[in-house]
Image: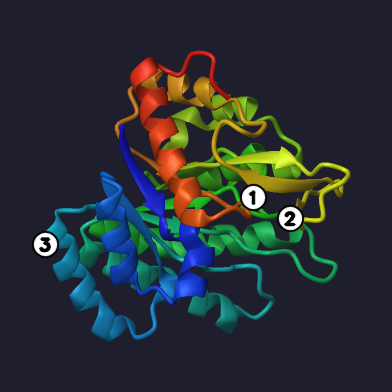
Amino acid sequence: MKVSVSMYSVNSTIQKEDWSTIDFINYAKEISLDGVELLDMYWKDKDTELEEVVAKLKELQLPVSAYDVTNNFVKESAKARSLEVEKINDGIEVAKKLGTKVVRVFCGDLHGDLTYEDGQDWIVEGLTRSAEKAEKEQIYLAIENHGLLAGKSTQVEEIIEKVNSPYVRATFDTGNFLLVHEEPENAFDRLREKIIHIHFKDFREKKPDESTKGFRSTKGVELIGSVPGDGQVNLSYIVNGLKEINYQGWLSIEYEGKDDAKTANEEAVRRLRELLEQGGENYG
């Protein structure tokens, strides 16, 4: 299995030091990553930057593990949902230029009085439309378990099955299941045959005396992003499970803590490589 880091994993550094995508790629090479995961939200001028990024990736011989699109199908306007389909279709074109076979996608965000049941038809409709292009280009759309819509493994599974395309699979985020109070091990067992991409992430519960603002779960519990191995996720279970199914894809680190992002990611890379070499025993 190959190790990459999501660009979002160093978001605080990007904001603080005004990094470009090129800066991130150079950093990834410095810490000896196998590849990088890039996001649509970081383009300043995509048309200009994309050509430069492709050239830099070729120069440094760094592949792209996935290209992430920040779409949202939970919109009551059909026109607005069509724009989200266009966003994913554009992401497929960018992915082709970047040389990756995976486009990470979202389902959508809850707002107002809407529920998952309200939004599910819109999500399935949008992903079905985008899957037409994905199938033609042989690019996988990888649904991330994210937020309150498709945050649970049952929801991800249900949407994948309803879209019913071999090119719509799962980005398995190891940490996000904790935000909907699902054990990541159970989620893995449910989705293991549908995984095409992994976000290697960990969370811990906020301590009573901490002032740091965390991510609030569906039951109001605050979780703090941590370096993998310092939180609640049984990462060894997931790594060993991936070996059992002969997973050949990427493990992409996504750190969402408050410590220095560069230092945290470098430690995360070290731990993940160690975990892969050891087989995952007694970790997490």
Residue 94 appears at what percent x and percent y? 29, 69
Asked if residue 272 lies left or right of residue 1, the reply is right
Q: Earlier in the sequence, mark 3 or mark 1?
A: 3
The answer to whether residue 90 is seen in the rendering is: yes
- Cα gap from disc 2 to disc 3, whole angstroms: 44 Å
Residue tagged by mark 3? 59
* For residue 194, above or below residue 74: above
Comparing labels 2 and 3, the label whose residue is closer to the camera: 3
> For the residue marked with disc 3, what is the amino acid?
Glu
Residue tagged by mark 2? 116
Q: CB of mark 1 within 8 Å of CB of mark 2?
A: yes
Query: Mark 3: which secondary structure?
Result: helix
Comparing labels 1 and 2, the label whose residue is closer to the camera: 1
Q: Earlier in the sequence, mark 2 or mark 3?
A: 3
Report the disc number at residue 150: 1
The answer to whether residue 139 is seen in the rendering is: no
- Cα gap from disc 1 to disc 2, whole angstroms: 8 Å
Residue 174 appears at what percent x and percent y? 56, 38
Asked if residue 196 lies left or right of residue 75, the reply is left
Report the disc number at residue 163: none
Residue 178 appears at what percent x and percent y? 70, 39
> For the residue marked with disc 2, what is the amino acid?
Tyr
Kindly indicate the quadrant of the structure image that contains residue 27.
bottom left
Comparing labels 3 and 1, the label whose residue is closer to the camera: 3
Query: Mark 1: which secondary structure?
Result: loop
So how many labels did they put on this image? 3
Instruction: In this rendered view, identify the residue nearer to me: 158 or 230.
Output: 230
> For the residue marked with disc 1, what is the amino acid?
Ala
Instruction: In this rendered view, identify the residue nearer to me: 229 or 72.
Output: 229
In the rendered image, the residue lying farthest to the top is 281
| Quarter that holds the N terminus | top left
